[in-house]
Structure formats: C-alpha cells, structure tokens
Amino acid sequence: PLCPQVKAFVTQDIPLYHNLEMKHLPGADPELVLLSHRYEELERIPLSDMTREEINQLVQELGFYRKETPDAPVPEEFQFAPARPLPTLLPRQASVVDRKTSPERDEGEHPDL
C-alpha cells in the first residue's frame, strides 16, 4: 500500500507533470523509473521514504515540466522535457568530423584556394 505522502503525489501531482505517467503494479514498492526516448530503463529511484514535497522537488530537478492545471498547454520548449541531448553523442559526432577533415589538413591540400 502507498504511504499517504506518495499517494498524494500520485493522485494530485502526477497529472500536472508533462511526460510523467503512473503505472500501477500491485504489491510493488513505489519508485520513479526513468526511461530514455527509446523506452530503455535508465534509473529507478525508490519513493517509499520520501515526502510529497521531496518527490516534487526531485521530479522538477530531473527536468519534468509542471503545468498549472492538468489540461494546461505545454510550451513548445518543454514538449520533450525532461529529455536532454545525449552528451555521449557530441564527442562521437565531432570525432567523425575530425576524421573526415584531418587527412586533407595532413596532406596540406587546399582545394578551395
């Protein structure tokens, strides 16, 4: 059974958050499961020992957008919140670019001159 703090969060706060949904699993301890854009599990955070205020703070720190009312529109910049660019992709893209351009630099060719 959900403690009153978690139950209040589930019933009153979850409807205000964009891209946050409740899945009821009978007998399971309440936890926040963070998924990637491909629905791969990233992390599980147990909520049993947290207050409603602490859960709200956590969810907002994770980047979930909280609406004024459950039916309020979500601003364009928060449509994909809390998704962030994957930091691991940036260096990989840069290294691909470097690999393509470095042989030209090494050979000292300047085709546009």
Image: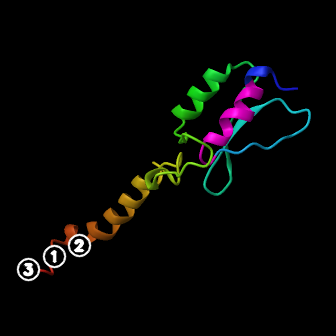
Measured from the top left, where is residue 81 in percent x and y? 52, 48
Callout 1 touching callout 2 (CB < 8 Å) = yes
Q: Quick one: label 3, few (<14), some, or many (20+) residues within 10 Å?
A: few
- Look at the numbered disc 1 and give the secondary structure of its residue: loop
Residue matched to label 2? 104
Q: Is residue 88 left or right of residue 7?
A: left
* Snapshot quadrant of residue 12: top right
Amino acid marked by disc 2: Glu
Amino acid marked by disc 3: Leu
Residue matched to label 3? 113
Q: Is residue 26 above or below residue 52?
A: below
Residue range highlighted in magenta: 6-19
At horizontal 73% and vertical 18% (from top left) the residue drawn is: 49
Q: Earlier in the sequence, mark 3 or mark 2?
A: 2
Q: Earlier in the sequence, mark 1 or mark 2?
A: 2
- Look at the numbered disc 3 and give the secondary structure of its residue: loop
